[in-house]
Image: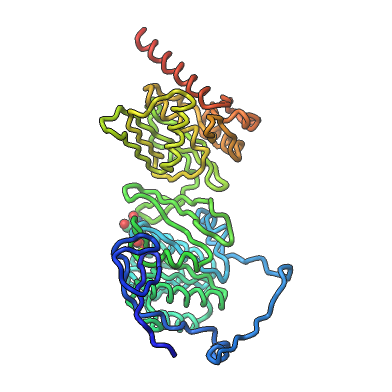
Amino acid sequence: MARLKPTFVCQACGAVTSRWAGKCEACGAWNAIVEEAAAAPLPGGASSTTARALGRGRVVVLEGLSGATDEAPRLVSGLGELDRVTGGGFVHGSALLLGGEPGIGKSTLLLQGSAALARAGHRVVYVSGEEAAAQVRLRAQRLGLADAPVALAAETNVEDILATLKDGPPPRLVIIDSIQTLWTSQVEAAPGTVTQVRAAAQAMIRYAKTTGACVILVGHVTKDGQIAGPRVVEHMVDAVLSFEGDSGRDFRILRAQKNRFGPTDEIGVFAMTGDGLEQVTNPSALFLGDREPDAPGAAVLAGLEGSRPILVEIQALVVPSTLGTPRRAVVGWDNARLAMVLAVLEARCGVRLGGHDVHLAVAGGLRIQEPAADLAVAAALVSSLTGAALPVDAVFFGEIGLTGAVRPVSHPGPRLREAARLGFKRGVLPAAAADAAQGTDVSIVAIPTLDVLVARLAARADAAHASRQGA
Ligand code: TYD
Ligand code: MG
């Protein structure tokens, strides 16, 4: 057997090198390379180890694609916002990674989810490596979940955990909180290092695949991604969920980043309260909650997150810059996308923003990815520049092309129905999507190209200016 040579592993991306360096060649992280003993071969599937040791492989049975397959049965927690993101419940035999910054509420969410499943009669084992059993129990009491029959353990050794799981009745759901605290005696590296995290995750994932239990691994990630772990586990699991939110605010968003058994664009919205996480079934009302109707620079986007329309306010502030290179600051949207909208405004509509600082924020801390936000962003920018507020009862959506054309986006109907439900009366949208308004109370302002919108907003600003001077 070959001797185990020390290897150097980047704690940020998991790249392995033969010598130490200050900067990782693979991901560019500084001071992230740490010496670790090379991973010993992991304990393999029991039946095949002897054959492999002799250098022979085991013959596996090949199957066709059309064979009978049980439709992946799911564990439905009953927490609608959680089930929506997993694609309708946790899939048996799957491994899932829940990532998020420390303190965001991962343990709270999973404790509530486990309690709901345990109350429904499923066996749930919650293994806490971070908190003592008494701490978890105390939290459960505070959340009113103390009566739920969740089996609790405070343990960090993988072999002990697996032995415990195999000892009792087989669980349907196993929660490991967190993967960074786990260690296996199969590899010689400190807990929390990439080697340990990878080996521990592999053992737990193998457990899920062989027993049919669903395993959820909790992983901490920091803003700059410094801490080892989740990154290397992402490739190994069936689904990666991230729990986000900003610590100054109460609400949290659960998002699927990867999902082999469901969509990846759904989000679940929760609010952190004194009694744990509460589901937010009407997120539009939440995101529009503290709107100031007469403020210039604010446009309401009729957005879509997965299958669910969500209305959210886009806020822009455009001010003359004192800097040589004006500032472009974006929160909750894409920097490159803002640069594109600014360029189209300048090149196709004659709106000069080269001497202005531009700040753009999606209200409430939501992160938006869809290009349908372009039109709302453009409207907010022009409104801030002219100082005239946009109509309070209008929603905006549409993608802006480089030519200045406003292009249709998916599902205009549901967007407008959500807007109508919340009392909006006007929809400013691509001309090609105008038919979608049929059957709603929303009247349509069809915008074929961006300069049409800019001209309308300029006329509106002039009228407001004239009436202010007349008064
Ligand atoms: P926690 O679930 O421990 O976070 P994580 O596991 O992601 O590190 O949540 C910790 C935060 O949540 C902590 O700052 C307190 C807050 N919290 C509440 O506001 N209300 C509650 O009922 C609970 C249980 C926690
Ligand atoms: Mg925790």
Left or right: 333 in relation to 444: left
Quadrant for the C terminus in the image: top left
| Of 208 and 119, the residue lying toward us | 208
**Residue 392 x, y percent position in the rendering:** 45, 26
List the single residue furthest toward the left. 322
The residue drawn where x is 33% and y is 28% is 355
| Of 459 and 311, the residue lying toward us | 459
Quadrant for the N terminus in the image: bottom left
The residue drawn where x is 33% and y is 66% is 138
Q: Is residue 118 visible?
A: no
**Residue 227 x, y percent position in the rendering:** 34, 64
Q: Is residue 54 visible?
A: yes
Q: Quadrant of residue 190?
A: bottom left
| Of 288 and 43, the residue lying toward us | 43
| Of 112 and 63, the residue lying toward us | 63
In this rendering, the answer to whether 299 lies above or below 230 is: above
**Residue 445 x, y percent position in the rendering:** 56, 24
Image colouring = rainbow
Q: Quadrant of residue 87?
A: bottom right
In this rendering, the answer to whether 438 lies above or below 467 is: below
**Whereabouts is ligand 1, in terms of quadrant?**
bottom left
List the single residue furthest toward the top. 470
Q: Quadrant of residue 158?
A: bottom left
**Residue 102 x, y percent position in the rendering:** 34, 60
In this rendering, the answer to whether 262 lies above or below 5 is: above
Please give the count of numbered marks on the rendered protein: 0
